[in-house]
Amino acid sequence: MYVECYDEVGAQVYDTLLRHTLQDLKLARAISAIKIFIDPREALFIGVVKLEKASQPIYLTDMAKHKMENGILKITIENENYLPDLLRVLWTKEGRLNVAQPDRYKIEITNPTIDPDNLIILDPSRELKRKVYDALFRIMPEGFRMTKNASEGNMVCIMSSDEIIDEKWNKKFNEVIEEVRNNNLKPQKN
């Protein structure tokens, strides 16, 4: 983890803020590398995070059995741990009115549109990325709403400013991305 800023005191403050934010969101173990670059003179913030590998997605078939009977998909819950997530997914995909739950362990959907064998209930990597974005937006200077996102794979990469993103900043953004991608974090002279 490294915070780069021309102002040493400012870098220390951001380092502390970053550590507290990662601790609050319980992200420290999920991140393999992170670099924050801040230049208040240019109104520039860059945050690049490399994530550890997340757990595999949870599918409907991991938590329940299902069968079709007379146009009704009948789901029998075997693992309640993901029931709230299942209901949220079903309500989103099928509509709340079309999802019936006659008892704690049964769900019925009339004329379903989902493929129950391939229905993802929870994707930990997606949730992890959401929390990392949350962390970056918490430490980003207030008013920095112009954002460029270059995230891909296991990398979350954001460049932000309080003005239109200048093309000249792309070189620094790409340098920081490569540093984090290659785990080559070391202090640089400004």
Image (cartoon, rainbow, N blue to C red):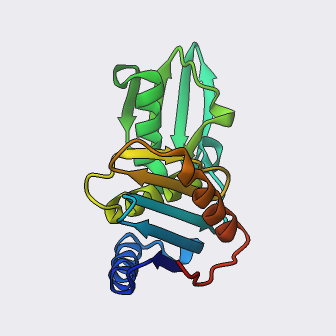
In this picture, is 89 found above or below 59?
A: above
From the top left corner, tell me how far across and down residue 64 is, in percent: 58, 44
Question: How many numbered marks, from 0 up?
Answer: 0
Q: Nearer the viewer, residue 109 or 184?
A: 184
Residue at far left of view: 142
Quadrant for the N terminus, please.
Answer: bottom right
Task: Name the residue located 65 percent from the left edge and 63 percent from the top edge.
Answer: 175
From the top left corner, tell me how far across and down residue 82 is, in percent: 48, 52
From the top left corner, tell me how far across and down residue 133 is, in percent: 44, 56
In this picture, is 146 found above or below 27?
A: above
Inspect this view and state whether residue 37 appears.
yes
- Residue 32: image quadrant is bottom right
Task: Name the residue located 37 percent from the left edge and 38 percent from the top edge.
Answer: 103
Asked if residue 37 lies left or right of residue 31, the reply is: left
From the top left corner, tell me how far across and down residue 79 is, in percent: 52, 54
Asked if residue 53 lies left or right of residue 102, the reply is: right
In this picture, is 14 found above or below 156?
A: below
Asked if residue 170 lies left or right of residue 135, the reply is: right
Inspect this view and state whether residue 124 appears.
no
- Residue 121: image quadrant is top right
Task: Name the residue located 34 percent from the left edge and 20 percent from the top edge.
Answer: 97
Task: Name the residue located 34 percent from the left edge and 74 percent from the top edge.
Answer: 24
